[in-house]
Amino acid sequence: MQNTLLATGKKVSRNAVAVMIDHPVLTSFLVALGVRVVFAVSSSLLHEGVLIPDEGQYLTVAMTASEGRLTSEFWLGYGQSLFASTRTFMWPLTALFWVFGPFRIVGQILAAVFGAATAAASAGLAGRFLRRPFTLAAGLTVALFPSQILWSSVVLRESLIWAGLAAMALVVGYSQQSDSRSRIVLSAMLLGLLFVAMVWLRVQTAVLALWCICPALLLGGGRRAVRFLSAICLLVVVPWLVGLGPGAFGFADAAVNRLGISRSYMSLSADSSFVEAVPDSVLADSGVVEAVPDSVLADSGVVEAVPDSVLADSGVVEAVPDSLLACVDQLNRNRGGDSGTGGVRGPFIERPSGEWVCISDTSGEILIVDNRLITSVKRVPGGLLDTLIRPLPWEASQNLGVLFAQLESILWVPMYALAIYG
C-alpha cells in the first residue's frame, strides 16, 4: 500500500511538472500571483500599517481622489501633482477604492497582479530564445525572487513599471520577428502607447526605455525603411507630444540641471546607507545652515557635505551667491510659520536649480545642496555600485532589510553575468 501511494505521488508530481513545462507563461503567472497574494494577506495580518513608508501617500491620495476631495488645496497641490505624475497606477487604484472602499489589501492585490504579469511576460520573452524548461525557470525566477515578491505586494507603482517594461520588451521582440509592414507599424504604435503610460508612472524610466527601444527596433530582418521610419517617429514625435521634447532631450536637459537636488530629496529621512553617516556637527553652529540629518550627509554620497571652501572657519558662508543666503533666510522664516505653508514647503514641490541650492524638507531642516553637474557625474560609478551590487555580504549592518538584501545580492550577481552573456 505504501509503495502504491509513493508511486502514485511520483506519477502525479511528474505529470504536474510536465504540465508546468508545457505552459511556462501561465505557470509563472499563477505561481507569482499566488505567492504575492499570500505574502500580502500575511503581511496585513502580522504587521499593522504599511510596510514601506511611501505606501502611505499613495493610499491617502487614492482614497481622497475616490471621495472627490483631491483639490488644489490638498497638500498644497502636491497631492494633485503626485496623482497626475503617476496616473497610470493611480487611476486603477482609485477606481478600486471607489468600488470596494479604501482598503490597503485592495491595492496590494492590484500590485500583485502587475507583479504576476511581469513574471509571465519574462517567461514569454525567454521563450523566444530558450527551450521550455529554461523558459519556465526564467519566469519562476521573477516570480520567486524575494525582492520581487516584496515590491509587488505593497501599494507602490514599481510592479506596474516592471510590467510595462516587460511588455515593451515583448512588443520589440514581436516586431523583430515580423516581416509584415502593418505589424511593424502596429508594434511601433503600441510601443508609443506603452511609453506614454510609462511617462505617467516614472518619466525617467520611460525615457531610458525609449532610448533602448528605438535601436532595438532596427535589428529585425527585412523592411528596413519601415523599421527606420517607425523608430524615428517613436523617438521624435511621441515624446514631443507628451511635452518632453523631440527625443525627450528637453526633459533630459532639465533633469541634468537638478540631479543633485533630486538625489537630495530622494535621500531625505533615508535609513538605508551602508556606512556610518557624517555627524550632525558637520556644518557647525554658524546660524546660517541647520545641522543636516545623518541620513542625508551619508558617506555613500547621496548628498555631498558642503566643502570647507564654502563654509569658512568664521561661520560665514563664502563662495555662495547672495540669492542662496536669501533662500536660507526665507526658509528660516517659513519654518517659523511666517509663510503659512504648513508641512509642505514650496521648494519641496518646485525643485529649484542652480550650482548650489538651498532646500528644505517637510520637517523644516534646511540643507545646502551641491547641484553641480561634475559632482553628480562623479557620483555615477558609486551610485551604480550601490544600487546594482551593494550591500556586499560582508558589510556589517544592523538594518534587517539590508541584511536580507545582502543575502539576495548573492543571487543577483550571477543574474547579471547571465544577462551580459545573453
Image (spheres, grey):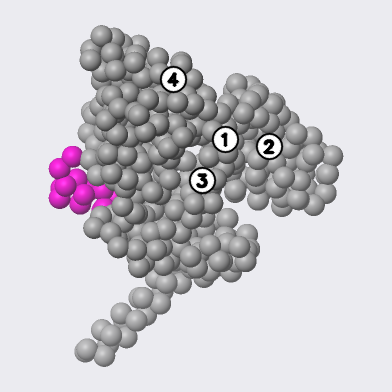
Q: Which residue is mark 2?
A: 188
Residue beneath disc 1: 373
Any magenta on residue 38? yes
- Specify which label sits upstream in the sequence, 2 or 1: 2
Between the residue at mark 3 and the residue at mark 4, the CA separation in whole angstroms equals 23 Å
Q: Earlier in the sequence, mark 3 or mark 2?
A: 2
Badge 2: how crowded within 10 Å, few (<14), some, or many (20+)?
many
Q: Amino acid at mark 4?
A: Leu
Residue at left 76%, top 50%?
Answer: 220
Is tag 2's residue or tag 4's residue first in the polypeptide sequence? 2
Question: Residue 226, how many percent across, how many down?
Answer: 81, 38
Amino acid type for the residue under numbered disc 3 = Arg
Distance from disc 2 to disc 4, alpha carbons, whole Å, reads 46 Å
**Start-end of magenta stretch:** 35-49
Q: Which residue is mark 3?
A: 379
- Assign a secondary structure to mark 4: helix
Give the residue number, with chain letter if any, for mark 4. 324
| Precedes in sequence: disc 1 or disc 3 | 1
Q: Are marks 1 and 4 in contact (CB under 8 Å)?
A: no
Quarter of the view holding residue 17 = bottom left
Q: What amino acid type is highlighted by mark number 1?
A: Leu
Image location of residue 104, percent across then percent down: 24, 36
Is 12 colored magenta in this rendering?
no
